[in-house]
């Protein structure tokens, strides 16, 4: 099992993890908690932004009731289909063009 999934978190660290999940601005988060979550590979800091890692998303999902976790995955899949993955829009920040959206399938 991954260390980040089993490691105990303080109530404040847990709250910070949920705030990252809710896309709270980095300036509004306690850096001590962010650094601890990063050391557990639950969040990553990149270009002044903090995001959940795959492991962090899994920890969030594991804490949700099964029906909410399934609804969350479905909602994310729908948003990604419409707008692309969040990292696609950040690609333009380093000078590379963003990836084009997926082509719609024809119903034939």
Image: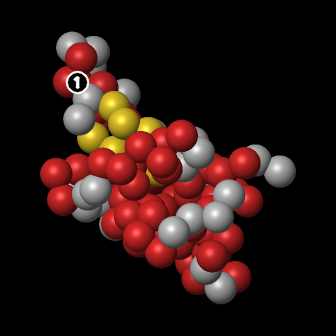
Residue at (63, 76) in percent of width and height: 63
Residue drawn at (41%, 43%) of the image? 35
Looking at the picture, how far across and down is residue 68, in whole percent? Answer: 58, 83
Callout 1 environment at 10 Å: few (<14), some (14 to 19), or many (20+)? Answer: few
Q: Which corner quadrant of the image does residue 28 belong to?
A: bottom left
Q: Is residue 42 above or below residue 96?
A: below
Left or right? Give the position of 19 relative to 55.
left
Q: Residue furthest top?
A: 95
Residue 80 in view, yes or no: yes
Residues 104 and 99: in front is 99
Identify the residue shown where x is 51% and y is 69%. Answer: 10
Residue position marked by numbered label 1 in the rendering: 92
Q: Position of residue 60 (x, y in %)?
A: 57, 67
State how many labels appear.
1
**Could you tell me residue 20's position as x and y percent?**
36, 59
Q: Would you say residue 21 is visible in this rendering?
A: no
Instruction: Name the quadrant containing residue 89.
Output: top left
Write the residue at 33% across / 31% down: 46
């Amino acid at each position: 099992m991954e260390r980040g999934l089993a490691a105990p978190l303080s109530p404040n660290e847990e709250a910070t993890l949920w705030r990252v999940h809710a896309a709270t601005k980095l300036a509004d988060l306690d850096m001590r908690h962010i650094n601890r979550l990063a050391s557990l590979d639950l969040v990553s800091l990149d270009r002044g932004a903090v995001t959940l890692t795959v492991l962090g998303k899994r920890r969030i999902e594991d804490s949700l009731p099964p029906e909410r976790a399934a609804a969350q995955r479905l909602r994310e899949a729908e948003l990604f289909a419409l707008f692309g993955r969040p990292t696609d829009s950040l690609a333009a920040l380093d000078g590379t063009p963003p990836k084009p959206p997926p082509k719609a399938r024809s119903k034939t």
